[in-house]
Amino acid sequence: MGPTFFLASWVNQRHEQEALNSIMQDLAELHRSTRRPALSLADLGKPKASSPKNQNDVRVKFEFKGERRILQFPRPVQLEDLKTKAKVAFGQAMDLHYTNNEDDLDKAVELLDRSAHMKSLKILLVLQSLLQVSDYYYYNIDNMLEVT
């Protein structure tokens, strides 16, 4: 092990340290940019104002085989939009099956759009090619408005 080995090792450690420092700086900057400003005591009692654009959005939580994704949909939510987003999110065509006592998924989605108080809608997400019980996974739609 000559001096070139130690020099190469030192240079490699130096590059790794610089990369680590760069990552840490990026994380610190991301943390600073996403932090909310502190509220004063006067602001705590005031209701939060929400933007009109976000009031028309519905957040959808997809879960399939333990993998979770959250996507936003503009109101009115369309059943075909749900199917398309499920296919894009999980890379394969999915069937949607309503899990509550409703007869029609279309009616349930319409009800979600009309009711500002409706919190969630449970749907089974199933691979189109497989209809085994083990391939059924829950799909949860939450009506959560983004508040800024």
Image (tube, rainbow, N blue to C red):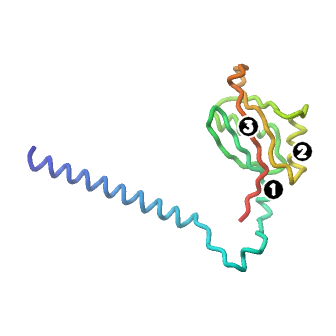
Q: State the separation of the CA atoms marked 2 and 1.
A: 14 Å
Which mark lies nearer to you, 2 or 1? 2
Q: Which residue is mark 3?
A: 139
Which numbered disc covers residue 111? Answer: 2
Give the quadrant of residue 93. top right
Q: Earlier in the sequence, mark 2 or mark 1?
A: 1
Give the amino acid type for the residue marked by disc 1 in the picture: Asn
Q: Residues within 10 Å of mark 1 (few under 14, many from 20)?
A: some
Which numbered disc covers residue 42? Answer: none
Which mark lies nearer to you, 1 or 3? 3
Q: Secondary structure at mark 2?
A: helix
Q: Secondary structure at mark 1?
A: loop
**76 left or right, relative to 48:** right
- Residue at (41% x, 57% y) in the render: 23
Q: State the separation of the CA atoms marked 1 and 3.
A: 21 Å
Q: State the separation of the CA atoms marked 3 and 2.
A: 17 Å
Q: Secondary structure at mark 3?
A: strand
Give the amino acid type for the residue marked by disc 2 in the picture: Leu
Which residue appears farthest toward the bottom when viewing the image? 42
| Percent x, y of residue 19 | 35, 55
Quadrant for the C terminus, please: bottom right
Q: Please tell me whether residue 116 is drawn above or below residue 135 in the rendered image.
A: below
- Residue at (77% x, 65% y) in the render: 51
Q: Which residue is mark 1?
A: 56
| Percent x, y of residue 75 | 82, 50
